Image (tube, coloured by chain):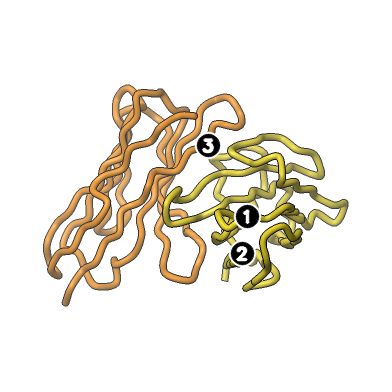
Amino acid sequence: TQLLEQSPQFLSIQEGENLTVYCNSSSVFSSLQWYRQEPGEGPVLLVTVVTGGEVKKLKRLTFQFGDARKDSSLHITAAQPGDTGLYLCLAGGTSYGKLTFGQGTILTVHP
Amino acid sequence: DSGVTQTPKHLITATGQRVTLRCSPRSGDLSVYWYQQSLDQGLQFLIQYYNGEERAKGNILERFSAQQFPDLHSELNLSSLELGDSALYFCASSSRLSWSDTQYFGPGTRLTVL
């Protein structure tokens, strides 16, 4: 099983602060996705990154895929209480059956 | 609303029993994925079906099985239940075979094994 290390596990910040969540592995992935999950609901896809070195922006969220396609980061600028939730990375290889989620980062943004 | 429906929403049963979880994918989606989410293991991929055929297997126990029917709905069967099987079970659907295609998750079924 491919291991996907996600950090930090918990993040509690004030509104307006910036934060970065990391997703790292020793394996190379064909692509990686970031999801956000709210209590009582299923995860919702935020972004898919495919190319090594790729950077994608979604409003205040910036996603980066490492050059070697082994790691990724999610950066949130000026966090808002509405950003509160569980953030998950999901990665897979070119072979089927190797879908792996990171352990998740529980983000709490205080007003 | 993702368009994916799962029933039942909650299920409480006893050890040793067997249960069936049902998932209806979004209209037109051919792929169905099953995931298990627990506090200690996080979110784990169990199995994927595409147009009625099993296409990928993750950390699915031998006591668990799944199938996808001609109308594309899917069922996850869990047997000889143990306390550790208590978890949230999600299904997700996507239009294509590739796992990196956008997956739409259902609201989940919370299984409690007593």
Report which residue position mark 1 lands on: B82
- Say which element carries label 3: loop
Chain in yellow? B
Determine the CA span between mark 3 and mark 2.
Answer: 26 Å
Determine the CA span between mark 1 and mark 2.
Answer: 7 Å
Seen in the picture, residue A107 relative to B66 is either above or below; the reply is below
Q: Is residue B13 left or right of residue B104?
A: right
| Discs 1 and 2 lie in a common subunit | yes
The image quarter containing residue B48 is top right
Seen in the picture, residue A20 relative to A110 is either above or below; the reply is above
- Say which element carries label 2: strand
Q: Position of residue A50 (x, y in %)?
A: 43, 33
The disc numbered 1 marks a residue on which chain?
A: B
Report which residue position mark 3 lands on: A99
The disc numbered 3 marks a residue on which chain?
A: A
Tag in front: 1 or 3: 1
Tag in front: 3 or 2: 2
In percent of the image, x 18 and y 63: which residue is there? Answer: A12
Q: Are marks 1 and 2 in contact (CB under 8 Å)?
A: yes
The amino acid type found where label 2 is placed reads Val
Report which residue position mark 2 lands on: B113
The amino acid type found where label 3 is placed reads Leu
Q: Is residue B56 left or right of residue B44?
A: right
The amino acid type found where label 1 is placed reads Glu
B53 or B67: nearer the viewer: B67
Q: Position of residue A45 (x, y in %)?
A: 46, 54
Chain in orange? A
What crowding class fits label 2: few (fewer than 14 Cα within 10 Å), some (14-19), or many (20 or more)?
some
Q: Are marks 1 and 3 in contact (CB under 8 Å)?
A: no
